Image (cartoon, rainbow, N blue to C red):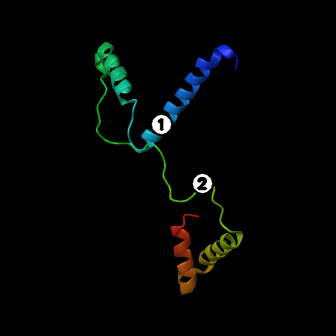
């Protein structure tokens, strides 16, 4: 940046900070843009009365939440054992599994592999 562009740089930093705060609040369920959306809907209804927008009080989930880290790898041995148990179920049925094997399958299903 040149010497005369300090204002532009600080404006970019401020816009980035506001964008960061906007996303943080949106994740908490607080939509700072709701007033703008309502204004645009009102103006659209004003000029297109036959296509009025329906207001809903239903809160939408705007993102996907999970308890585990994204792209979390499972160990190769665990995956091989799971595949072997599933193959055993496929060939012989669920009833042939031991108590330890059924417990392993229950734990694996709760971990969302």
Residue corresponding to mark 2: 70
Q: Which residue is nearer to you in this view: 85 or 42?
A: 42
- Quick one: quadrant of the C terminus? bottom right
Pick whichever, 80 or 5, lies toward us: 5
Q: Nearer the viewer, residue 71 or 81?
A: 71
Tell me the quarter of the picture where residue 34 sits.
top left
Say which label, 2 or 1, has the lower sequence index. 1
Residue drawn at (58%, 81%) of the image: 101
Looking at the rendered structure, the secondary structure element under dot 2 is loop
Residue 99 coordinates in the image, percent (x, y): 53, 86
- Relative horizontal placement of residue 80, taking residue 107 as reference (left or right): right
Q: Quadrant of residue 46?
A: top left
Give SS at disc 1.
Answer: helix
Residue holding disc 1: 21
Determine crowd level at label 2: few under 14, some 14-19, many 20+ residues with C-alpha closer than 10 A. few
Say if mark 2 contacts mark 1, CB within 8 Å: no
Q: In this view, does 49 lie above or below 33?
A: above
- Answer whether residue 96 is visible to the viewer in this image: no
Q: In this view, does 18 lie to the left or right of 41?
A: right
Q: Which mark is residue 66?
A: none
| Residue 59 position within the rendered picture, expressed as x and y whole percent measured from the top left | 34, 42
């Amino acid at each position: 940046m040149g010497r005369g562009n300090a204002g532009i740089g600080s404006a970019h930093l401020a816009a980035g900070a506001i964008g960061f705060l906007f996303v943080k609040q949106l994740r908490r369920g607080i939509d700072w843009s709701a007033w703008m959306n309502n204004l645009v809907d009102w103006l659209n209804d004003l000029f297109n009365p036959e296509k009025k927008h329906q207001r809903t009080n239903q809160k939408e989930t705007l993102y996907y939440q999970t308890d585990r880290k994204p792209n979390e790898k499972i160990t190769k041995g665990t995956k091989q054992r799971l595949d072997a148990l599933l193959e055993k179920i496929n060939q012989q049925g669920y009833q042939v599994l031991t108590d330890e094997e059924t417990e392993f399958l229950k734990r694996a299903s709760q971990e969302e592999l």
